[in-house]
Image (tube, coloured by chain):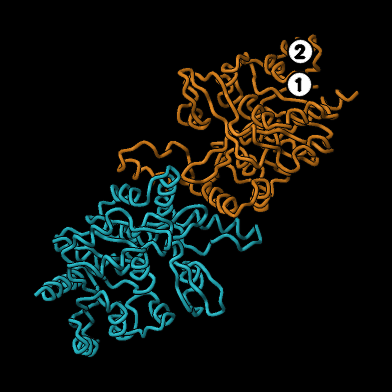
Chain colours: A orange, B cyan
Amino acid sequence: MRITVLAGGIGGARFLAGLRTLGHDITVIGNNGDDVTLFGLRICPDLDTVMYTLGGGISADRGWGREDETFRVRDDIGAYVAASGTDDLPSWFGLGDLDLATHLVRAHWLAEGLPLSVITARLCARWEPGVRLLPSTDDPVETHVTLAAGERVHFQEWWVRLHAAVPATGFELAGASGASPAPGVLDAIAGADVVVLPPSNPVVSVGTILAVPGIREAVAASAAPVVGVSPIIGGAPVRGMADACLAAIGVETSAYAVAHHYRDLLDGWLVDETDKDDADRLNEDGLLARAVPLWMTDLDTTARLAGAVLTLAADVRQ
Amino acid sequence: MRITVLAGGIGGARFLAGLRTLGHDITVIGNNGDDVTLFGLRICPDLDTVMYTLGGGISADRGWGREDETFRVRDDIGAYVAASGTDDLPSWFGLGDLDLATHLVRAHWLAEGLPLSVITARLCARWEPGVRLLPSTDDPVETHVTLAAGERVHFQEWWVRLHAAVPATGFELAGASGASPAPGVLDAIAGADVVVLPPSNPVVSVGTILAVPGIREAVAASAAPVVGVSPIIGGAPVRGMADACLAAIGVETSAYAVAHHYRDLLDGWLVDETDKDDADRLNEDGLLARAVPLWMTDLDTTARLAGAVLTLAADVRQ
């Protein structure tokens, strides 16, 4: 079965690890909203998280970055920050030494003029993730956040440096108007047997993938069932700070509200058993919804969740 | 006394460490011919060697790069090289982890639009080299080498990757025609009490500094004595592969021949005691030359050599 997944970082990657055990032909459309240029290097955190997670290189503790990581480069940059007396160096971003190797190789190939999709495939030649990993677009895009005070900052600055603690009032995928889907993306959606929205951040992960012109339209037009997994359990994000993102766009932090946020695309929706009431309400609203265990505590539970997604998709088709 | 030194990498940096102990006002005009863009990062090896050496951060064993260095990033890049099956990644360049911090900080400030001279001063705020270190130019330049077969390669590719073992037929400072001296360079030459050509490579270090339009003319026009130290002892380079460079431009590898190579600029020249005959011949040719111990085996001998340079300059003035 051909399964196309619109995945952000940690949550999407973990879901994919479970899905992969079921043995299908999986294409992942990765999120480029988190992309950022730091120290002259283009960094694609969500693509890397998927690649490292599925390639066995992810830090199990952190969920992002590399296992057996060290931070000698970052610490030495700190000595420059201290001596320079300026705070214009983005030393708040957690650049690990091994992770840097990926960024440097990507920078070299970008400087050679290779598109990000080709570079991603080349990086994956090392990691062998067992899925086809595509960026949402080869064009440079990145999420900018409007803060309550009116200031606009890069998503990473809000997320990592400010810990999403400063209220946001909006998100924009800067560069989107001039961007088009990377080669293979629209075909992967049109040719899928199932399109999955995994438990990734609906605003700054799945939302920014859908913000690349043509992708939302392709998902909406897909003949295949589009099924999603709630990233919200019991009114709180499974991980990360999705609540801060949802609040900014006026969406309640609930499994029910996120389903409605996706309503024009969705054919089916999984919520956690805790949120069975949300599933009942959604079914009353006319969306096929089901309550199953959503916590991806290990590979087995995650594989069962992925199986529930495919069952839901099959039931949509009936 | 205001002393201006046109310095390359290791030899120049060691000489400067000795000169600095004599307590003068020293300006260093560094070589940018070695500069190279690798993995999207602009790397300035000679500036860094001077900065690290005088700032106490140099690897004592290697003479370049950082003390207590590790190579985790480079080794991890190697895993990408192995998996990609391509050899287009410049993994032959010895990028240390701590050294990378310097390159990343420089890349960040370059991306902000700061000129290299300002960036170099900011980097030096950490290292406090005790001299004013200026790049020869803020404009991007780099030495290209013509190989006997006609191919042109970057200097670093010839020097580091090919170990200068492939015969060269010429050197060109690419970008020189559009380059001008960095702020402060011409003033440092015009206002110097002594201009020193230390035992750096006459072709690809001092030669490339002089190739920035205006610098050679400023040295030639300087009212101050211009004195040099032979980088050749007993017919062989003190360090590095200057013989391969000299051969390419048709200059014999001898203290005598290098003095004649600089003849339009020089007022005085120091050769090693081994090369006393060369000094005698140069004196007959009308150049004040003197034979003294040139081996910079430790800081004391280097300081004595620097003292001999200043004595020679004083004698030129008589």
Toward the right, the furthest residue is: A318
**Quadrant holding the C terminus of chain A:** top right
Q: Residue at (31%, 60%) from the top-left corner?
A: B50
Position of residue A232 measured from the top left corner of the image (x, y, whole percent) = 64, 20
Instruction: Check disc 1 and report the residue beneath it.
Output: A269
**Quadrant holding the N terminus of chain A:** top right
The quadrant in which residue A306 appears is top right
Position of residue B295 measured from the top left corner of the image (x, y, whole percent) = 25, 77
- Mark 1: give few (<14), some (14-19) or many (20+) Cα within 10 Å: many
Q: Is residue A73 above or below residue A156?
A: below
Q: Is residue A33 above or below residue B5?
A: above
Position of residue A310 measured from the top left corner of the image (x, y, whole percent) = 81, 30
Q: Amino acid at mark 2?
A: Leu
Task: From the viewer's perspective, tell me whether residue B108 is left or right of residue B67.
Answer: right
Depth check: B223 or B238 in front? B223
Q: Amino acid at mark 1?
A: Trp
Marking on residue A282: 2
Q: Chain of mark 1?
A: A
Depth check: A218 or B72 in front? A218
Whole-number angstrom distance, CA of label 1 to CA of label 2:
9 Å
Callout 2: SS: helix
- Tell me, yes or no, whether the two marked residues, 1 and 2, touch with CB atoms within 8 Å: yes
